[in-house]
Amino acid sequence: MTTYPGEIWLPVIGYEEFYEISDYGRVRRLKRRKGPRGVNWPYLQPVPQRSGHLTVTLYRDNKPKLVKVHLLVLEAFIGSRPKGMITRHLNGDPADNRLTNIVYGTYKENLEDDIRNGILKGRAPWKVTAPCKSQECKRGAIAKGFCNKHYLREWKARTTS
Ligand SMILES: [Zn+2]
């Protein structure tokens, strides 16, 4: 793995002794653990979730915790998430966790992002293989685990609450 020019690293909040997060959304280990050593040491290999968001498993006191990479970036570089806010991926790509692409925002702003980015028209930048989370819906999920109809229903309810 290469180092990006000007890449900035900060301690991962709550795991300051063990991991750092960069403004490019990469996570690296500070100490070796016992056991097999991955080929990509010291970088963690993120795992994409159904939604397209990337996660990594962090260890503290030998306890694993699955965390979203975008939250690590914002917590370290911006601060903790204000109550009632969520993370927006401005360009619509949930795997693009560069600090320039993510920001805290409201559900309404997040919905507007998805509309602007064409995600509700099936132009999601990630490959969708999961079925819609809504019960008995036979369509494929295109955003946040829902088809476009159920996504709009779920998310419009949140933007007005
Ligand atoms: Zn559906």
Image: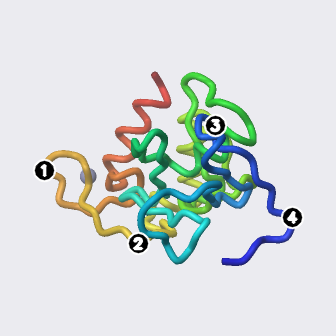
Q: CA distance from mark 4 to mark 1?
A: 49 Å
Classify mark 3: residues with Cα within 10 Å, few (<14), some (14-19) or many (20+): some
Q: Which mark, residue 136?
A: 1
- Check the picture and name the quadrant holding the N terminus: bottom right
Classify mark 4: residues with Cα within 10 Å, few (<14), some (14-19) or many (20+): few
- Check the picture and name the quadrant holding the C terminus: top left
Percent coordinates x, y for residue 118 in the rendering: 53, 62
Q: CA distance from mark 2 to mark 4?
A: 31 Å
In this view, the residue farthest toward the right is: 6
Q: Is mark 4 within 8 Å of ligand 1?
A: no
Near-viewer residue (131 or 53): 53
Q: Earlier in the sequence, mark 1 or mark 2?
A: 2
Of the residues shown, which amino acid type is indicated by label 1? Glu
Judge depth for marks 4 and 1 and give the one in front.
4
The residue positioned 48% from the left and 25% from the top of the image is 160
Q: Earlier in the sequence, mark 4 or mark 3?
A: 4
Percent coordinates x, y for residue 138 in the rendering: 17, 59
Q: Which residue is mark 3?
A: 13
Task: Write down the quadrant of residue 74 in the picture.
Answer: top right
The residue positioned 34% from the left and 52% from the top of the image is 145
Q: CA distance from mark 1 to mark 2?
A: 22 Å
Q: Which residue is mark 4?
A: 6
Q: Which residue is mark 2?
A: 127
Of the residues shown, which amino acid type is indicated by label 2? Lys
Q: Earlier in the sequence, mark 2 or mark 4?
A: 4
Of the residues shown, which amino acid type is indicated by label 3? Ile
Q: Are marks 3 and 2 in contact (CB under 8 Å)?
A: no
Judge depth for marks 4 and 3 and give the one in front.
3
The residue positioned 40% from the left and 50% from the top of the image is 144
- SS state under label 2: loop
